[in-house]
Image: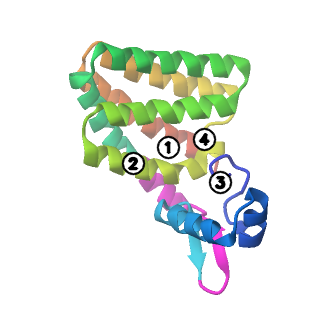
Amino acid sequence: MILGGEVPAGERLNEYTLAEQMGVSRAPVREAARSLERDGLVTTVASQGVFVRKLSTDDALELYDLRAMIAGHLCARVAERADDATIKGLRDRVRRMDKAIHAGDEAAYFNENLACHDNIAQAADSRRSAALYVGLSKEARLLRHRVLSGRDALLVSNAEHDAIVTAIEHRDRDAAHRAGCEHHQNGKKRMLATL
């Protein structure tokens, strides 16, 4: 619900309401809140409750910079290591994102986008880097509606995905590294343009 934008940044999570809405007791809601806090998506304020995290501009900029560095590394490793099935899977993701854009389905685009980045992280065969990237990406999802919204933004974003996958297809480590970094740095620019 948080990642989908149903619960906006800064909003307090009502334990009772969520438990009722999901048909569970309050205990699983509390456990979920602890997990979300570990993922950087919520903040617990003593005697006040759990709130959806608001990222400061500085936090957001740092997230983009860190993700850019790690993504470049992961993309370069995939260019060196990927088998044909992995490359085909990445190319298919880019095609599905393109179809989602043309269908006006931002939710489908976002899900394919996440899966594409997760596939790259997995295919890099670098457990620590992938774990860092995925962790940072969870926090960055709080910015989704600011950065990945509207047909033009999605077209630009997917052109960047295409550049990453093309570099991987050509087994060009340097181009894949550069494209992975640029994609996240361009996301940072798109985020700054919303301020």
Tell me the quarter of the picture where residue 8 sits. Answer: bottom right
Would you say 106 lies left or right of 117 here?
A: right
Colour logic: rainbow
**Alpha-carbon span between mark 1 and mark 2:** 8 Å
Q: Earlier in the sequence, mark 1 or mark 4?
A: 4
Q: Amino acid at mark 3?
A: Ile
Residue 188, which numbered label? Answer: 1
Q: Is residue 11 above or below residue 194?
A: below
Q: Residue 83, position in %: x, y?
A: 27, 17
Q: Residue at x 37, y 31 (%)?
A: 120
Per the image, the residue denoted by label 3 is 2
Q: Earlier in the sequence, mark 2 or mark 3?
A: 3
Tell me the quarter of the picture where residue 179 sits. Answer: top left
Evaluate whether residue 155 shows in this view. yes
**Alpha-carbon span between mark 4 and mark 3:** 16 Å
Q: Amino acid at mark 4?
A: Val
Q: Earlier in the sequence, mark 3 or mark 1?
A: 3
Single out the mark in the foreground, 3 or 1: 3
Query: Magenta stretch: residue 1 in it?
Result: no
Q: Earlier in the sequence, mark 4 or mark 3?
A: 3
Q: Nearer the viewer, residue 34 or 158?
A: 34
Q: Residue at x 51, y 63 (%)?
A: 35
Residue lying furthest bottom: 47
| Residues at marks 1 and 2 touching, judged by CB atoms closer than 8 Å | yes
